[in-house]
Image: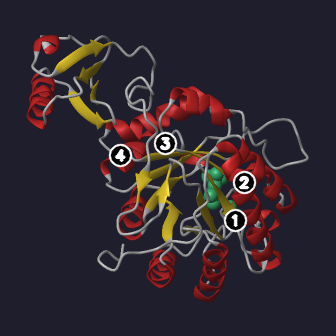
Amino acid sequence: MLVVMKAQATPEEIQAVCDHIVQLGFRPHPLPGAQRTAIGITGNQGEANRGNLESLSGVAEVIRVSKAYKLASRDVKEEDTVVRFAGSNASIGGRDLAVIAGPCSIETREQAFAIAAEVAAGGAQFFRGGAYKPRTSPYAFQGLGLEALKIMAEIREKFGLRIVTEALDSESLELVAEWADVIQIGARNMQNFSLLKKAGKQRKPVLIKRGMSATLEEFLMAAEYVMSEGNYEVILCERGVRTFTDHTRNTLDLSIVPALRHVSHLPILVDPSHGTGRRDSVLPMARAAVAAGADGVIVEVHNHPESALSDGPQSLYPAQFATMMTEIEKIAPVVGRHLTRGVSVSAAAGQ
Ligand code: PEP
Ligand code: MN
């Protein structure tokens, strides 16, 4: 259920409605919008009792949300969500395109710094790098763990780049939330519901990769798990799904971008690196992602992809990354978007 407050409702009236929802035994989720605040209600299994919500001061109407996902739905929040990063001009969602770039895995301090210098020079605002790697083989490189998180914190310090990295389990989640700026939940964990709930208790944005065979609804329900715990800063990321094709590693399903946009207010990124598995396909699909209306891209970049410890074949050379930036910068205005190059950090807040 959803309580829509009147445009002129006061903060006290909004608080009184939230208190009332708590008394009814449910959880209120106030989501301020440009026109009015809506308060999502969760915690009810089945139809919630409206009580006398409609008669409370400042309430415009009480609406039943019929979709399975509620807080992630445009029914609850009409305007697009923009995730902002305090102390910098970096954001995900809204008019500006977000570009997240970096190696699949942090391998050494030298490797990470060399690649960070390249992606910063190319104009990225976010740096990605795996510290905890979900590998198909237990014998493959598993990531440097905390050491990698510390290297990336130094990269933020030096280049201003905001850090995006994956949390694999409860233990790494705590550490990623402490050291990084965005907690990534990987495709393999998209339906790890206990991990999603724990991510919802953190106060850092959560980037969720679409599961390899997840439907749109299953994808949004993953977002709903995070939001139901009170963390509304969720970013969706299409990264390819499993199909019968064998010319690419996965099939990048760009058609989910407008479909998600239609029903959800959350930002939508596209990962053409994992989506195709091939360096030569990354640039065309990054262009297509922007043209399809994505809020940005996340791409793998490596200075020596031929000797990378993971995902070398799909990693761009730095010069290819620079070309990608130039090309998506040109496409952006065609679809009403803009690419802001580089991150500016205000002196007051280093993070
Ligand atoms: C990654 O981004 O490094 C990754 C493992 O992605 P995914 O979860 O989409 O496979
Ligand atoms: Mn990878």
Cβ of mark 2 under 8 Å from ligand 1: the answer is yes
Q: Secondary structure at mark 1?
A: strand
Contact? badges 2 and 3 (CB < 8 Å)? no
Q: Amino acid at mark 2?
A: His
Image quadrant occupied by the N terminus: top left
Rendering quarter of residue 300: bottom right
Q: Residue furthest right?
A: 247
Cβ of mark 3 under 8 Å from ligand 1: the answer is no
Q: Which mark is residue 300?
A: 1
Image coords of residue 254 (percent x, y): 72, 39
Image coords of residue 269 (percent x, y): 60, 48
Q: Residues within 10 Å of mark 1 (few under 14, many from 20)?
A: many
Rendering quarter of residue 181: bottom left
Q: Nearer the viewer, residue 75 or 176?
A: 75
Q: CA distance from mark 2 to mark 3?
A: 20 Å
Q: CA distance from mark 4 to mark 3?
A: 12 Å
Contact? badges 4 and 3 (CB < 8 Å)? no
Q: Secondary structure at mark 2?
A: helix
Identity of the residue drawn at 56% across and 72% down: 342
Q: CA distance from mark 1 to mark 4?
A: 26 Å
Give the mark, 3 or 1, whose residue is nearer the N terminus.
3
Residue placed under numbered mark 2 in the picture: 274
Q: Residue furthest bottom?
A: 110
Residue placed under numbered mark 4 in the picture: 200
In the picture shown, does residue 342 fall above or below 202?
below
Q: Is residue 143 left or right of residue 241?
A: left
Q: Secondary structure at mark 3?
A: loop
Residue placed under numbered mark 3 in the picture: 192
Give the mark, 4 or 3, whose residue is nearer the N terminus.
3
Give the mark, 2 or 1, whose residue is nearer the N terminus.
2
